[in-house]
Image (cartoon, rainbow, N blue to C red):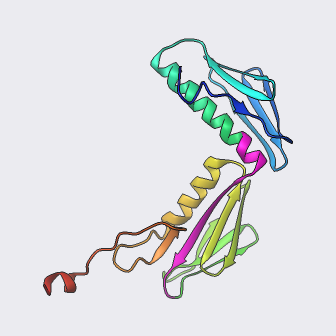
Amino acid sequence: MSLVGKKPIEIPKGVKVQVKDGVVLVEGPKGKLSYTLSPRIKSEVKDNQVIVTRCADSKRDKSMHGLSRALIYNMVFGVDQGYKKELEVIGTGYKVQVQGETLNMNLGYSHPVSFPIPEGIKIEAPKQNQLVVTGIDKEKVGGTAAEIRAVCPPEPYKGKGIRYLGEHVKKKVGKAQATAK
């Protein structure tokens, strides 16, 4: 069996999980999510747990078994507690602010950069140099945070740019310092 796939998923209080025609529906206090299972993967709800099983033992079925279990777990966790990614903006004059459904960023370019906020994602800017991306879908939250970071990734000489909170950027020695030795 798959190491991940054989573990049952505990359903927390306030979360409802239904399996109908190969589609897993998860509903909780933060919202609703659905996932279509592979035809070779089966899922059922028993005793406040979700159990994921597979039809055969081929390598592809084993990998889909673990993947399906992990995605269903992420859905259950997301509708119960939600996901959050924090980003920090480092650089002189670098600022971010949320205006309606758009994130406006001044990142040292000759023009401000506008980023449309996707549906199902909430972005807050508690400070001018800090962003918090929240939502119930782990993939959307991580993808949105990665897209924002890609607008101005941290550069290796001064560390200016957008980075995840707590991310360590390995700095390079500048050309003048490297030849002075």
Image coords of residue 133 (percent x, y): 66, 62
> Toward which corner of the image does residue 128 lie, by quadrant?
bottom right
> Toward which corner of the image does residue 46 lie, by quadrant?
top right
Q: Residue furthest top?
A: 56
- Residue 116 vertical placement versus 5 (above, below): below
What are the residue bounds of the magenta stretch? 76-92
Image coords of residue 158 (percent x, y): 38, 80
Residue for point 79% across, 40% down: 12
Residue for point 74% across, 36% down: 34
> Toward which corner of the image does residue 180 lie, by quadrant?
bottom left
Image coords of residue 181 (percent x, y): 13, 84
Residue for point 57% across, 79% down: 112
Image coords of residue 40 (percent x, y): 60, 16
| Tally of numbered tags | 0
Residue for point 72% across, 22% down: 22
- Residue 94 vertical placement versus 14 (above, below): below
On whether residue 84 falls in the magenta region, the answer is yes
On whether residue 118 falls in the magenta region, the answer is no
Left or right of 61 in this view: 9: right
**In this orientation, does residue 117 appear?**
no
- Residue 67 vertical placement versus 84 (above, below): above
**In this orientation, does residue 133 appear?**
yes
- Residue 46 vertical placement versus 9 (above, below): above
Residue closer to the observer: 87 or 7: 7
Residue closer to the observer: 19 or 120: 19
